[in-house]
Amino acid sequence: MQSIWESRQFHRTPDLVVIGAGIVGLFTALFYKRAHPNHHVLVLERGPFPSGASVKNAGFACFGSPSELLADLDKEGADAMLARVENRWLGLLELRKELGDAAIGFEATGGHEVYAAHDPLYTRVANGFDALNDLLRPIFKMPVFHWEDRSIARFGLAGMDHLVRTSLEGPLDSGLMMSVLLRKTLAEGVFLRPNAEVLRFEDSPMQVTIALKDGDILNAAQVVLATNGYAKELIPTIDVTPARGQVLMTAPIPGLKLKGTFHYDEGFYYFRDHAGGVLLGGGRNIDIVGETTTADATTPGIQDALECLLHDMILPRTPFTIVRHWSGIMGMGGSKTPIIERVSPRVTVAVRMGGMGVAIGIRVARKAAGMVADRPLQ
Ligand SMILES: Cc1cc2nc3c(=O)[nH]c(=O)nc-3n(C[C@H](O)[C@H](O)[C@H](O)COP(=O)(O)OP(=O)(O)OC[C@H]3O[C@@H](n4cnc5c(N)ncnc54)[C@H](O)[C@@H]3O)c2cc1C
């Protein structure tokens, strides 16, 4: 039995239900609410708080390392590569403007890619380097990447011979980012229902009916699915494959030289400084099949590979203690382009961030919210 107050405020039929309280789901709800202040917008999240990749990544604000961009250029041509870089770069600028650099812990300490001299990747990057900077110039209005081999010693790295730097990238604090975004979304009138796992939804001409794990059934006028790496659980045919990324973190290291964000081995490894220690992730290429999973776990094989990299390259001859391991689930698929689509008159999906949702999440969300609102949103 609901009181009139409950049924008017909390149990009214939502105009929009967003499934998933990650960066995409929260921004989608926020942008839609701004466009329709009188609509009831509800976010359903299965965790007690946001629990997906948005709070499990390594906190990188980056738009693509030279080796990634040159590989994309070879595979897809200049237009597709440039469009993707521009989307990521504009996404990062919009994110920083919307939430504020200090509020999300963004540090403009630079992004880097490192190579050993004998690595064929180095030769490929060296050969394509100037042409890549020329192609990127219209987006950044400056040469974006610079060789800075002398910084290898400054950062205390061993076994590496070449380093490329851009001053336009840097680390951020994903926890701060998501907590600021969550508070902003709630403050602007969106409702959040945590511990609300969606088991299935059914579309009909009048409404979407949503079944929750706790037995509750909700109806909504519109639904946006923003569960990224978990999308297949609700739409089994969708082209989104879960891709687990494992991370570890060390205790603070006295005199740590590392500063900024770093990519190595075609981006399969990424590391940065955080709170005086090192945060290192990657190694998915060691076991692509095993890491195609939504299981919230780490594995000895990949964690050992990460530890070896710490010993051999990032913290040579430096004692360290690992204080934390975790993993997060990304959403990949046949294309690096996200799926932002109305799949039926009342259901829109905004998934497959391709491991770049920090950069593109805000723009994906704006587009998804615009689709629901039936007009582009600024
Ligand atoms: C280790 C790692 C490193 C990364 N590095 C980078 C990087 O360098 N640059 C970059 O831009 N991005 C990076 N990413 C990717 C980025 O974090 C993601 O693309 C982004 O956070 C995805 O956001 P999302 O909102 O789409 O999904 P998520 O943050 O995963 O949110 C989905 C939410 O849906 C909820 N959910 C799932 N199923 C249900 C259900 N049935 N019912 C209710 N709720 C449900 C989940 O609990 C979760 O909170 C990285 C990710 C990882 C894990």
Image (spheres, helix red, strand yellow):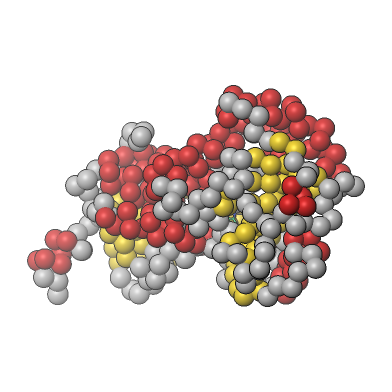
Q: Identify the residue at the far front of this view.
A: 255
- Indicate the position of residue 65 as horizontal and vertical percent values: 68, 43
Q: Identify the residue at the far left of this view.
A: 4
144 or 25, which is in the foreground? 144
The residue shown at (79%, 38%) is 125
Q: In this view of the protein, can residue 51 be seen by the observer? A: yes
What count of labels does the image hold?
0
Q: In this view of the protein, can residue 287 be seen by the observer? A: no
9 versus 38 height, above or below: below
As drawn, is 230 to the left or to the right of 196? right
Q: Identify the residue at the far right of this view.
A: 118
The residue shown at (68%, 75%) is 321
The residue shown at (30%, 70%) is 216
- Indicate the position of residue 202 as horizontal and vertical percent values: 37, 57
The residue shown at (90%, 47%) is 118
Which quarter of the figure has residue 312?
bottom right
314 or 357, which is in the foreground? 314
158 or 45, which is in the foreground? 158
- Indicate the position of residue 19 as horizontal and vertical percent values: 39, 58
- Indicate the position of residue 209 as horizontal and vertical percent values: 32, 59
Identify the image quadrant of the N terminus: bottom left
Which quarter of the figure has residue 327?
bottom right
